[in-house]
Amino acid sequence: MHLATFLVNNLIRMGIQIIKRSGLKEPYYQDKIERVVVAAGLKPKEGKLLAENITAWIKNLGQNEITSEDVRNKVSGELAKVNRFAKNAYDWYEKSKDTNGS
């Protein structure tokens, strides 16, 4: 089994929940991070690796819940290490969601 698949399956089994801005909770999905960072400008392989790193980070926290803000901040920080353009695009997108109430 691929490491990323193993980690995602473990997070789902562990019941890791993302606490959204609204207070609602939803299950963690690695592919959601992968899609958004690729849309921001990473190559698919880079996006997959970054999303796997975020998944490992969440797993290592050992918590059942994490805020979407914490995840967003971690994604932004990881993007800054690999692609400044993608980081800026991601931050702009997230900020636009804040101002539009999404």
Image (spheres, helix red, strand yellow):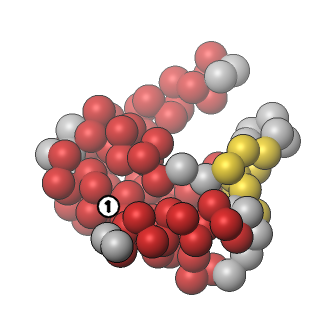
Q: Quadrant of residue 25?
A: top right
Which residue in the rendered view is the most extreme toward the right? 23
For the residue pair 7 and 52, the one nearer the viewer reads as 7
Which residue sits at x=20%, y=56%? Answer: 46
Which residue sits at x=54%, y=50%? Answer: 29
Say how many tags the image has. Answer: 1
Which residue sits at x=41%, y=54%? Answer: 76
Residue 90 shows in the view: no
Q: Quadrant of residue 1?
A: bottom left
Q: Is residue 82 left or right of residue 59?
A: left
Which residue in the rendered view is the most extreme toward the front? 1
Residue 93 shows in the view: yes
For the residue pair 30 and 75, the one nearer the viewer reads as 30
Which residue sits at x=50%, y=63%? Answer: 8
Q: Is residue 62 above or below residue 17?
A: below
Amino acid at dot 1? Leu
Q: At which x and y percent is residue 88?
A: 32, 41
Classify mark 1: helix, strand or loop. helix
Q: Is residue 35 above or below residue 68?
A: above
Q: Is residue 18 left or right of residue 90?
A: right
Q: Quadrant of residue 17?
A: bottom right
Q: Is residue 74 above or below residue 43?
A: below
Q: Is residue 43 above or below residue 66?
A: above
Residue for badge 1: 50
Q: At which x and y percent is residue 77?
A: 40, 61
Which image quadrant: the C terminus?
top right
Binning the other alpha carbons within 10 Å of mark 1 as few (below 14), some (14 to 19) or many (20 upward) gives: many
Q: At which x and y percent is residue 36?
A: 38, 38
